[in-house]
Image: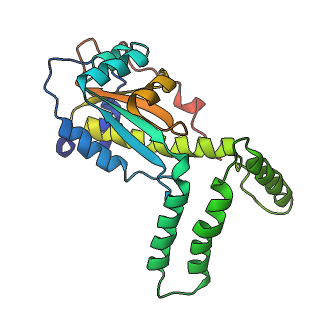
Amino acid sequence: MSAEHHTFADIIRSRRSVRKYDEAAEFDHDVVTRSLELATLSPNSSNMQLWEFHRVINADKKAKLAHYCMGQNAAKTANELVLFVVTPYKWKQQAEINAATIREAFSDREDETAKRALRYYEKLIPFLYNNDRFGLFGLGRKVLSCYMGLRKPMVREVSKADLRVCLHKSTSLAAMTFMTAMRAEGYDTCPMEGFDSKRIKALLGLPKQAEITMIVSCGKRAEDGIYSERHRVNNNDVIFSH
């Protein structure tokens, strides 16, 4: 499959979660490089980009990682495994980078739009992302949000747990971009959530505060790599107009 000869709809329809790869098939690791570079362009909350993508290519580490993925065939037979990881502990430095970018972009403007954009990264982001161990700051934000919401529309998802969900959503968007890019070049993937995160973080030296959103295996599908025909619930049951 190549992007020149297939529409986006073709690529999406041909993408499947492949459970077993052809280990004898040729695999171009440069495709993973290109696909991850496209993944970095994915939309993400407040452009904070609090993600990391860890490629596991080394045979010994890959075997251990597959074991920590509960021995799934999708991991054991893969040519490469890619971890999509959220990094909430990097919020300060990223907020500073974003503020500097905004400052430069609006260097010749002092209108309300420019001031509001700068306040967003210098005031609001620190207010939302600063969390203590027990989530008390987030609880305080939640109370404040409920109070302000009595008089006007207000964002309600402001707790530490809400932020965690937000970061995983952004990283999931990047993972989807990656899997679509891989399929566009004729390769297959499988996103996995069944794994021992503690052992995997120790294996790869990831910080305790890092969280693994998913692990995506990569390769060329084996003939028996897809277990059944695709099944989806009826569109009328999930697509609504208001």
Q: Could you tell whether 198 is left or right of 160 in the image?
A: left
What is the x, y in percent for residue 36?
Answer: 31, 44
Number of marks drawn? 0
What is the x, y in percent for residue 6?
Answer: 23, 40
| Front residue (pair 203, 14) | 203
Q: Could you tell whether 19 is left or right of 106 in the image?
A: left
Q: In which quadrant of the rendered image does the N terminus lie? A: top left
Identify the image quadrant of residue 80.
top left
Asked whether residue 7 appears in the rendered view, the answer is no
In the rendered image, the vertical position of residue 140 relative to residue 5, given as above or below: below
What is the x, y in percent for residue 238?
Answer: 58, 33
Q: Residue, x 53% and y 36% (percent of image)? A: 208
What is the x, y in percent for residue 102?
Answer: 49, 73
Q: Could you tell whether 154 is left or right of 184 in the image?
A: right
In the rendered image, the vertical position of residue 3 relative to residue 216, given as above or below: below
| Front residue (pair 85, 64) | 64
Q: Residue, x 30% and y 23% (percent of image)? A: 62
Asked whether residue 199 appears in the rendered view, the answer is yes
Identify the image quadrant of residue 104.
bottom left
